[in-house]
Amino acid sequence: MSAPETSQAVVKGLVVPGLPQPLLTPEANEGYARLRGAFERAREEILESGADVIIVYSTMWPSIIGHQVQALARPKWVHVDELFHDLGSIPYEFRIDTELAGGICDSAHARGLTARTVAYEGFPIDTGSVVALQLLNPGNELPAVILSSNVYADRSETVVFGKSVVDALESQGKKAAVVVVMTLSNRLFTRFIDPTEDRIHSDKDEEWNQKLLEFFAAGRLEDVAQLSREIHKQIRIPKVVNFKPMWWLSSVMGANNNYEGKVHGYAPLYGTGGAVISLTPAAAGVGIKEFDEGEVEVFTGNRDVLGGASPAPAATATTAAEPKAARRAGAAPVHEVPAGEPATALRTDAAPKPVGAYPHARRVGDLLFLSGVGPRQAGDDSIPGGPIHDEQGQPLDYDVYAQTRAVIANIERILESSGSSIDKVLDVTVFLVDMDRDFEAFNRAYRETFEGIGATRTTIAVRALPTPIAVEFKVLAAAGDA
């Protein structure tokens, strides 16, 4: 599948932190001062880009009901951060492009989203948007639009919202510099610290921050958006707010890796990773690397129920009444089950075919019960890591670590096709054919995914499994909207 082309309406993309230290107390820490200088260099890039407007997508402006768009022509107030009020007040007055704000809402409605403008005197603009615009656009050289980050929107809905922004820009013939307000690692200290003691919260967070900086510097925007799901599992942050802007930015700019990336500055910000990064569309770059999801154009109802403008006719839900959570965009469709199976049964092409008369999963209320899942691959039934014996039953050497990783990948596909996800797993029963030989390697592979999920687990030794595999999982998970 080819990725969308880079948007011609977006001439610059930026990633900036929203905490107030670089604005209010840059002298308190060398890193804060470094970020302050990085903001200034990013500001110069915006002014040189030819942009007509700055669009800010802020994770620090959460919304619940739909997507909010700031549309008051001249919002003016004195802002005080709810956590760091001791640092001082931030007076502001912004110039808002009300025409574009309204156009974004109209485009969002046309794509099936819930959205509305905010044009209320005294509405509290969030710290992240205030900090970003004060440092990137201090004299209101360009008008701005500020967008909320919906708490419950999944990747697909966020992608659709990004496309709505592009629709509005193109219809009004405007070019934008788009700014996402976020930190890399998003784990703040839970006690107040002396600024001189600021550091990245953990070594694991720092490792992932450096990997993200490497990708950004290489202009690999879509790879960052794809990698975000793995990072989320690894650093065990119980929310995706810090990666949602990457999904949005990739949608707005173009889901590919053809960008010139520049890391202007990076430093700890109260335990998180603060970075000022710019992305400029380029004629060539790394190109498409891991673009593995289908095109999503329209929001069609409940969250996690998204599809393109012309959905494939075979992609149908299996319940008698439409289930509350259906497949995520990009997952293989959930197909109708054979006659005689319960209407709540689910099958998908994303996982290997069952070897007996049973579906991949069955939904009961807010729970998903998965049939036993092994490492076989959809389509060819090959076994990563190799089978445990040949057709004559003679033992073969095999890699249970590779088999376990393949099992987990199959579980992820089944869950996503059913409208859920791996982080919603509640209970796992594991069957091993050789506990003494395989437990250590299996447990290592298991821990890489499940350590931060907290599912209960039972591991059982069995004499054999129906196919020549060493490991199988039985999973209970919450449904996507549970």
Image (cartoon, rainbow, N blue to C red):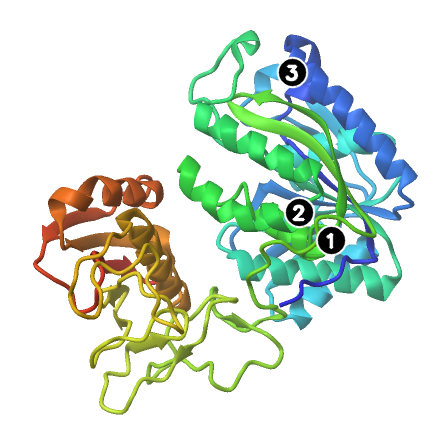
- In percent of width and height, residue 289 lies at 62, 53
Task: Name which residue type carries label 1.
Answer: Met
Q: Earlier in the sequence, mark 3 or mark 1?
A: 3
Q: Which mark is residue 31?
A: 3
Q: Earlier in the sequence, mark 2 or mark 3?
A: 3
Element at label 2: helix
Eyeballing the image, is 434 above or below 166? above
Instruction: Tell me if label 3 and label 1 are in contact, CB under 8 Å.
Output: no
**Which residue is at 27% across, 91% downward?**
339
**Which residue is at 26% across, 76% downward?**
359
Q: Which mark is residue 221?
A: 2
**Which residue is at 28% across, 40% downward?**
444
Element at label 3: helix
Instruction: Tell me if label 2 and label 1 are in contact, CB under 8 Å.
Output: yes
| Residue 317 placement: quadrant | bottom left
Task: Name which residue type carries label 3.
Answer: Gly
Q: CA distance from mark 2 to mark 1?
A: 9 Å
Q: Which mark is residue 253?
A: 1
Question: Is 151 placed left or right of 161 in the picture?
Answer: left
| Of labels 2 and 1, the one closer to you | 2
- In percent of width and height, residue 464 lies at 12, 62
| Of labels 2 and 3, the one closer to you | 2
| Residue 42 placement: quadrant | top right
- In percent of width and height, residue 418 lies at 37, 68
Question: Is 467 placed left or right of 228 in the picture?
Answer: left
Q: CA distance from mark 2 to mark 3?
A: 25 Å
Q: Which mark is residue 132?
A: none
Q: CA distance from mark 3 to mark 1?
A: 29 Å
